Amino acid sequence: MKLAKPLLIVVAALAIAGALAYALIDKPTAPASTFTTLEGKPITLNDLRGKIVLVNFWATSCPGCVKEMPDLIETYNQYKGRGFEVVAVAMSYDPPNYVANFAKTRQLPFPVALDVNGEHARAFGNVQLTPTSFIIDKDGHILEQKLGDLDFAKLKALLDKELT
């Protein structure tokens, strides 16, 4: 029994050191991308520093993407005044007229960009599947990458924490 207490202290110290080391690990930096919106306006990620940015790769032919858009619109409207931005990046295989029609008929309130030649998908690690989302912190680091439908309760909890 005399060995148990020192062992417990060592294990606790190692756990604390591990947690601290993990917290200090540099998060990957988002690529220095310049997106062009449907209206032809350039948006650079550097210009969005100071905000939490969700870069969402999607397609009009993706059922999960279409399904999550109403929740994405609601979340954007709820948090945009607090420093949250969304950039919806349509995949290169998505016909531009389909994307423009979707954005117009669904009244997407956030910027929608075309990835005409796939350069943005490549810059973000060769995104192939949709939806794929990247949450970027105020300093331009990727906080989270999500393949598949977003968990909006988790996203809102993250936004509440980061946008204080």
Image (tube, rainbow, N blue to C red):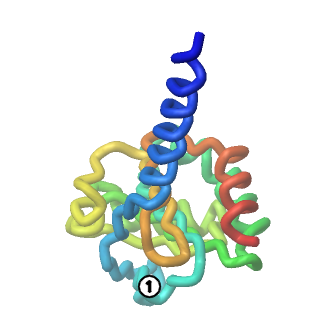
The residue depicted at 37 percent of the width and 78 percent of the height is: 35
The residue depicted at 44 percent of the width and 80 percent of the height is: 37
The three-letter amino acid code for the residue at tag 1 is Ile
Q: Nearer the viewer, residue 75 or 12?
A: 12
Residue at the top extreme, as displayed = 1
Q: Nearer the viewer, residue 66 or 56?
A: 56
Apparent side of residue 89 relative to residue 122 in the rendered image (left or right):
right
Residue at the front extreme, as displayed = 2
Q: How busy is the neighbourhood of tag 1: few (under 14 within 10 Å), some, or many (20 plus)?
A: some
Is 44 rendered above or below residue 66? below
Quickly name the residue at label 1: 43
Q: Nearer the viewer, residue 9 or 112?
A: 9
Asked if residue 63 can be seen in this view, the reply is no
- Residue 71 percent across, percent down from the top left: 69, 51
- Residue 135 percent across, percent down from the top left: 51, 60
The residue depicted at 38 percent of the width and 81 percent of the height is: 36
In which quadrant of the rendered image does the N terminus lie? top right
Count of marks placed on residues: 1
Q: Label 1: state its secondary structure.
A: strand
Is 58 rendered above or below residue 159? above
The residue depicted at 49 percent of the width and 56 percent of the height is: 23
- Residue 150 percent across, percent down from the top left: 57, 45
- Residue 68 percent across, percent down from the top left: 61, 46
Apparent side of residue 61 relative to residue 54 in the rendered image (left or right):
left
Asked if residue 91 can be seen in this view, the reply is yes
